[in-house]
Image (tube, grey):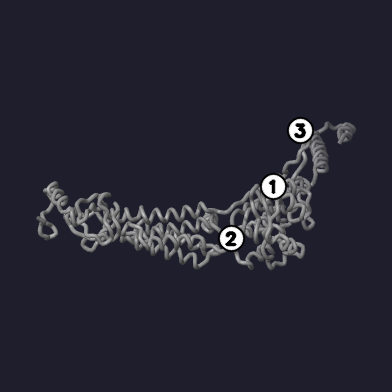
Amino acid sequence: MRRLPSVCAALGAPLPRAALLGAVLLRAALIGAVLLGGALLAAPPLAAQESDQPAPLDVIEVSGLLDPVVADFISKSIARAEDDGAQALVIQFNSRKAVIDDDELADLADEIADADVPIAIWVGPSGARAYDGSGQLVLVADVSGLSPGSRVGNFGDPIESAAITPRMRAMIEDFCCSSLGAAEAVEEGVVDLDAPVLGQFVVGLDGIEVDGVVLETARTVQSADGPRTEPNTQVRFFKLDLLPRLMHTVASPPVAYLLLTIGLVLLVFEFYVAGVGIAGGVGALFLVLAAYGLAVLPTRPVGLALIVVSMLAFAIDVQTGVPRVWTGIGTAAFTGGSLLLYDGLSLSWITLLAGIAGVLLAMLAGMPTMIRTRFATPTIGREWMIGELGEATADIDPDGVVRVRGALWRARTNRATPLRTGDAVRVVDIDGPVLEVEPEAGGARDYREHRRRTPDAPENPSGLADET
């Protein structure tokens, strides 16, 4: 390019302005090409840039009984981790028992063992448990950890799965009926890591090789206190959706038991109020949810039958408002049914107390009062009952039950004149749904005095001759 002006000068011709501009542009293009090539040579390949950021880590939480909802959640989480390119799936685990059948449990163990993505199970936080078939899944995982205060063991019988190796089977048999803490579990080789919190367990996965894949979950950084290790990968948390979470909650023993109890009580109440209303609808809904929970849980038919029989026994005495022999039968049947409802599972004393005390309170106090108030509110008044004769069907001291014109009524008498079953009584006053009565013999004088105090009452409503 530098020779172009010289040639033009030698020929005695002036240098064209267009040629000069072209030479400048050509030089600029050559310089830009050189700079761009140097930049491309200095930059690392795209794959090398992407490798600086480790693949993300998926984390899910499993808590409560290992039921079909939880088993399906674990399976879907494994598939999602494989499809989304996660380097591992971490399961935060707390389950005392598996309530799925043995074949489903074996399939889940095989799925964990054969997953294309490493599976790590951390039993935590402190106080968590991994027992029964749920605990055997901890042995199948590629990496396992236990927090201090948590326990693993009580494995029961080994599941029939190809994932259970002879070494695992020996562990299951050794700790079939006992459990281990964090330090003991690591020492016995039941778990790999002792990690107090989930973050430390994630950091502890760094550098572990699973099927030729080395996990990268942590990095060392310098701080004022010296070097420390921290997670260096993206952690993605997943949990159950709303509807599966609801069904998982319904399938817990205390919730299914309380739903069953409340549903039956509401249906008994709806039967006595002679109509299908809010109580009946809510009771039916509760029974449907309870039926699902009881179908998932190991339920004894005898326990369920006793609870149903107890409601029938309570219903017989509900209208009388006074505990009788059927109330005793209902109480015994409901208590026995509550204790025998589940096979291999037990309800806490708080749940049992809430269920038994709640049923007794509803059947002996709340429901009789509501029913009596509803049916004992005539539109034309009940003053006609004053002076009526009746019979005590239960001891009245001071409260009891009387039969007046073939109907049973709650009654009250003076403490100084208690009445026995079968005694003749006379109605002297009405206090809401309760009749105030006195003995027929020796009570006529008081009755006549009462009639004088109520001149607006109909005279001789019973058609009986006045006593003189």
**Residue 235 placement (x, y as % from top left):** 67, 47
Q: Earlier in the sequence, mark 2 or mark 1?
A: 2
Q: Label 1's element?
A: loop
Who is closer to the viewer here, 146 or 163?
146
Say few, some or many: other residues with alpha carbon within 10 Å of mark 3 (under 14 / 14 to 19 / 20 or more): few
Q: Label 2's element?
A: loop
Q: Residue shown at 26%/52% (left/top)?
A: 412
Q: Quadrant of residue 138?
A: bottom right
Q: Earlier in the sequence, mark 3 or mark 1?
A: 1
Which residue was labeled with disc 2? 67
Who is closer to the viewer here, 66 or 113?
66
Which residue was labeled with disc 1? 148
Who is closer to the viewer here, 76 or 434?
434
- Vertical position of residue 307 compared to residue 19: above or below: below
Labels 2, 1: front one: 1
**Residue 299 placement (x, y as % from top left):** 53, 64
Say few, some or many: other residues with alpha carbon within 10 Å of mark 2 (under 14 / 14 to 19 / 20 or more): many
Residue 309 numbered mark, or none: none
**Residue 69 placement (x, y as % from top left):** 57, 59
